[in-house]
Image: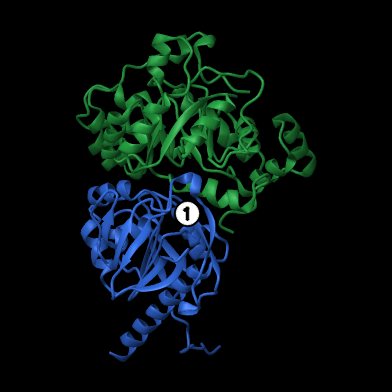
Amino acid sequence: MTLPPIPGFTADEVRSKIGFCEQLKGGVIMDVIDADQARVAEEAGAVAVMALERVPSDIRKQGGVARMSDPKLIQEIKAAVSIPVMAKVRIGHFVEAQILEALEVDCIDESEVLTPADEEFHVDKRPFRTPFVCGCRDLGEALRRIHEGAALIRTKGEAGTGNVVEAVRHMRTLWSGIRALKGMDANHLHKKAVEYRVPVELVSWVAEAQKLPVPNFSAGGVATPADAALMMQLGAETVFVGSGIFKSSDPVSRGKAIVKAVANFENPHVLAEVSAGLGEPMSGLDVRTMPEEEKLAVRGW
Amino acid sequence: MTQVVDDTTEPQAPLCGVLAIQGDVREHVQALSRRGIATRAVRRPEHLEGLDGIVLPGGESTTMLKMLAFQGLWDPLGDLLRSGRPVFATCAGLILCADDVQSPAQQSYGVLDVSVTRNAWGRQIRSGTFELRTHGAAGLPDPMSGVFIRAPGIVAVGPACEVLATREGQPVLVRQGAVLGASFHPELEDDHPVVDLFVASLRASVGERTVADTTS
């Protein structure tokens, strides 16, 4: 079957919410802070834009509480482009999510990049008609979010660093988790479900299908066409690019190059061609020397 | 042992390309595979060789347009679309095949004599499964369902084009020769009759060519 019954989702939700996310596969979703950047992203070939008040590298530098964007900016971005518009809410901030649904954004990102509003609960995503995307570092976190109603998962990486190392770690960890379920007997599946704090039906679905029930994208640290292709070869169905584009010296060329790299992720000749002469990438941060409390990926439970 | 030569061997399974630049490629591949059709992902011009038909999937038409040019596919794909071989275009694919595109205006192949307006059925919040009327056109059941996702609207239909299904009185499924275009996503449903209709045209087209080859 195209989309097998997914525990916790109605057939219509599978088709309309998850179906929407399936349309984004192989395209690049770019972070933008205003309508001008959104137009640049669309021109570069983005499949969707993600509206947020500051890109992650600025959130890191400037500190303070990072929140949902100003609705005025979101409306301007919606008016500026014909591609889907996503926007971020703080973890657990279901009222920001209600506002984004009222603004008719196409997808809501409950994101660790913003300052969490609830340190115990994520948003209950089921009552919303708008699909949600959520971050994860491993299979358990992915399944908890899907159980709450997320229609799309992105591995978190470490946003705003321009360093792909955490994105790689999270994608590899997620796939090891999926592969580890293969052929597991009922007792072990139950044990995993307890460990992951989700219904056993969801764990069994993944054990059988050997994939997540929703599309699986990558985020957090992708700065070059090669980074994007690396995440695709590691099993991402596409990539979100945050600070990597608009914090580089030539956003249009870099955006176009990353779009081309994703579509040709298995072709090193094309990757070599599109990687040439792009100017300076965003300056990167070494995640190893970063204090634990500065890491965004640890937000979310 | 005598070797038996079977003169009634069925023609090989039709080989259908699926444009694989971006979008719900896997869903189309699975829908065709379940019906015994061989598929090939089309990313470069050489992938068009020897195809019996092609699917243009859902996704974002702006992204696809830019990438068709970069991949060197714009012209050779156009040749295939105009070759009379079966074409199945859903959502973004329909936009690529239309004669005229609005909101905003953009380049298209013009193999379906229709005007389309992008996202005319609304943003994602209005996406869902809706009832369509066919009045039995092309043997399709009436009513049937359709999954609409930020779907384009067909706002004008030229005389060369046949309307096979409507939603709320508006055309959503059209056919012109061997080109079938849908505003919605039959590939996202398990057993949608519109996929069957395309598969039947694919098999018929291969059958006709096989007969032509043997008689020539």
Which residue sits at x=27%, y=67%?
B111
Camera-nearest residue between B50 and A204: A204
Crowding at dot 1, Cα within 10 Å, few <14 / some 14-19 / many 20+, comes out as some
**In the drawing, does residue A258 fall left or right of residue A190?**
left
Percent coordinates x, y for residue B208 in the rendering: 37, 84
Which residue sits at x=27%, y=50%?
B65
**Which quarter of the rendering shows the N terminus of chain A?**
bottom right
Which residue sits at x=54%, y=36%?
A132
Percent coordinates x, y for residue B103 in the rendering: 29, 49
Q: Check the rendered structure and report the hue given to chain A.
A: green
Give the chain letter for blue: B
Query: From the viewer's perspective, is residue A187 above or below residue B175?
Result: above
Query: From the viewer's perspective, is residue A85 above or below residue B146?
Result: above
**Badge 1 amino acid:** Arg
Camera-nearest residue between A260 and A50: A50
Query: From the viewer's perspective, is residue A62 above or below residue B97?
Result: above
Tag 1 residue:
B26
**Which quarter of the rendering shows the C terminus of chain A?**
top right
Say what secondary structure mark 1 lies in: helix
Percent coordinates x, y for residue B153 in the rendering: 38, 58
Which residue sits at x=27%, y=38%?
A44
Tell me if I can see residue A21 in this picture.
no
Percent coordinates x, y for residue B185 in the rendering: 47, 59
